[in-house]
Image (cartoon, coloured by chain):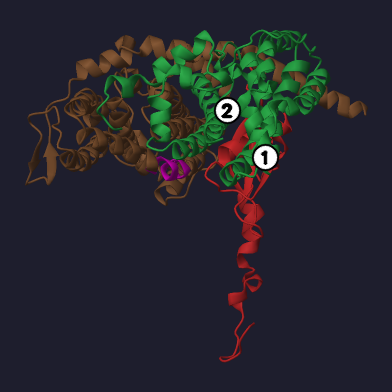
Chain colours: A brown, B red, C green
Amino acid sequence: MENEKKLEQFQGKIDANIKIEPKDWMPEKYRQTLIRQISQHAHSEIIGMQPEGNWLTRAPSLRAKKILMAKIQDEAGHGLYLYCAAETLGVKREQFLEWLHEGKAKYSSVFNYPTLTWADMGAVGWLVDGAAIVNQVSLQGTSYGPYARAMVKICMEESFHQRQGFEIMVELAKGTKEQKQMAQDALNRWWWPSIMMFGPHDSESAHSNQSLKWKIKRASNDELRQSYIDKTIEQGHHLGLTFPDPNLKFNETTKHYDYSPIDWDEFWNVVKGNGAGNKLRLKHHIKAHEDGKWVREAAKSYSKKMNLSKKIA
Amino acid sequence: MSSDDQGILWEVFIQVKAGRPYKHIGSLHAYDKEMAMKSARDLYTRRNEGNGIWIVKAEDIISSEASDGEAFFDPSNDKVYRHPTFYKIPDGVKHI
Amino acid sequence: MKNELIDYCLRLGDSSLILSHRIAEYCSKAPILEEDLAITNVGLDLLGQAENFLTYAAELKGDTTADLLTFKRREGDFRCLHLVQTPNTDFAFILARQFLMDCYHQILFSKLISSEDETILGISKKAIKEVNYHLDRSNDWIKRLGLGTTESNERLQNAVNDLWMYTDELFIDNSTDIAMNKNKIAPLSSNLKSDWLEMVESALKFSEIKIPQEIRYSLRYGKDGFHTEYLGFILAEMQHLPLLYPDATW
């Protein structure tokens, strides 16, 4: 009875667009959904450093090198904001990392694809970040305060990411024949994975309805996907490149672009761990974590010693 | 449970410009206060957002409980006389 | 004199460039996320310094750019110190290398801010602020590792032992140093040594790290265009795209 009343009050706050804060009462399922979603989001930022880090030492100009380095650093920062937001729900960062390493927590599958050429730095920035931004802009209105605040900060910082990606595509598209080919090849490889980033269709999505009702999510997978496709196609036309989908066509009735059916077999295959990078990305993260263990122990032990000596003195 | 240790959780407050109030900007992990301060600088002022930084251990923050929120905050709801717009000032009187 | 000035700018620019490259390699591998961000800031500062010095070198040379100097120059024309070429091993090594360079940069730039060359003076004024912070940060870590645990102390000691021989080069004067000093553009490298030693020794001793024996391990150095075997691989990676697509701009 008590719980039902609390639940009603809780929904009332959500409906009135009042943010939920860490110490407020919340349904256990709301907490669990947030823990899963925010940490997954954080892991994605952190794992997402790797495919771009892959080209950091090979960036072909000083300018490109600086920008890429700052961008990967931002991703580390965004992961950090999100881990901290997730921690307000009562789970420590140690635990999140453990779940990631044990394979219990997921990250966005798109980062399991390899970055094969420099043009991938363009395509990842333009398409993958472009898709992520559509999602993040919508999440600025999420109902959980710490998550919403992290999103506002992330969106402010992300705005340069997509631009840097698009700029690389522009440079390549107007460059030599080989460069243009490189750009087209990257678009071919990243287009479908970027579309799949929005997750399964609304009809297939396990968590969608409740998340929308609680305003954890503010728009459905398909709505976000459509808005991403609509704006990206216009941008692609400026590049003079072709999207790898013969059925991409503006629909006068819906005022949106139609697209081919998505290859969900591939999507689930990558989610389940059969992508080119799944093992690699996780192994890289685990190795860094294990290599750093003695450093963390040293820092902790030093801090204890310092506190002790202060108390004596 | 994990034996790993990611350090202490700290809350970070940034003053954007001299004279402005310090505002909470986010959190971070660090093992000691020097590291916390430097990480705050590297993390939260890398776009030149900061003039001053405060850091405090998250565990040292005393926060009002959500459950007693009503008893705690409602009594000041009706004290409109604390707000300047409560007062009627004759037209033409300036700088008050 | 102009050639020596170019040579000197290349030394400063290339050393920061290659150290920044080593930091870039470490990206996403730090012991804690906060440290990943922090060390990247150092890498970005160094890259900025490299760009400034290489831009000046390019201006003096004429008919080239900082990018061309970075991506189309041959190994023998690089002037980076051996110390920055050493490959990353563990965090103690990366950190110790950084600390030794930070001390060197701090002492060097604090002299270069009174250089009679306007451009070097300008670049150094910006750089000294960055370097002071780098040193503050790496100095903290020297303490944490030196006084942390037995393992961290051992690892730091090993790193310092391995790196020590490369510090020799920092204080050897070649003809460029002599010309720079004569024209009041830069101090003699040998003049930096006692300050550097004092700074490094006091930090290491405080952190219970022993100072290794001085060894002169080479008579030919990076600043003279003779490099470690590591540099070739760094350049092969760094220059790969511009060399593979010579007609392309990026």
Kindly identify which chain the residue marked by label 1 belongs to: C
Query: As drawn, is A45 to the left or to the right of C176?
Result: left
> The C terminus of chain A is located in which quarter?
top right
Q: Say which residue appears at 59% left-offset and 41% top-offset.
A: C120
Tell me where residue B40 sits by quadrant.
top right
Tell me where residue A138 sits by quadrant.
top left
Q: Say which residue appears at 62% left-offset and 75% top-offset.
A: B84
Kindly identify which chain the residue marked by label 2 belongs to: C
Image position, residue B76 (x, y; %): 65, 62
Q: Residues within 10 Å of mark 1 (few under 14, many from 20)?
A: some
Q: Which residue is mark 2?
A: C39
Query: As drawn, is A205 to the left or to the right of A144?
Result: left
| Upstream in sequence: badge 1 or badge 2 | 2
Residues in magenta, as a range: A151-159
**Which three-letter amino acid code belongs to the residue tagged 2?**
Ile
Q: Residues within 10 Å of mark 2 (few under 14, many from 20)?
A: many
The answer to whether A141 is drawn above or below residue C176 in the figure is: below
Q: Who is closer to the viewer here, A122 or C119?
A: C119
Q: Which residue is mark 1?
A: C184
Predominant secondary structure in magenta?
helix
Quick check: is C161 in the magenta stretch?
no
Q: Who is closer to the viewer here, A52 or A66?
A: A66
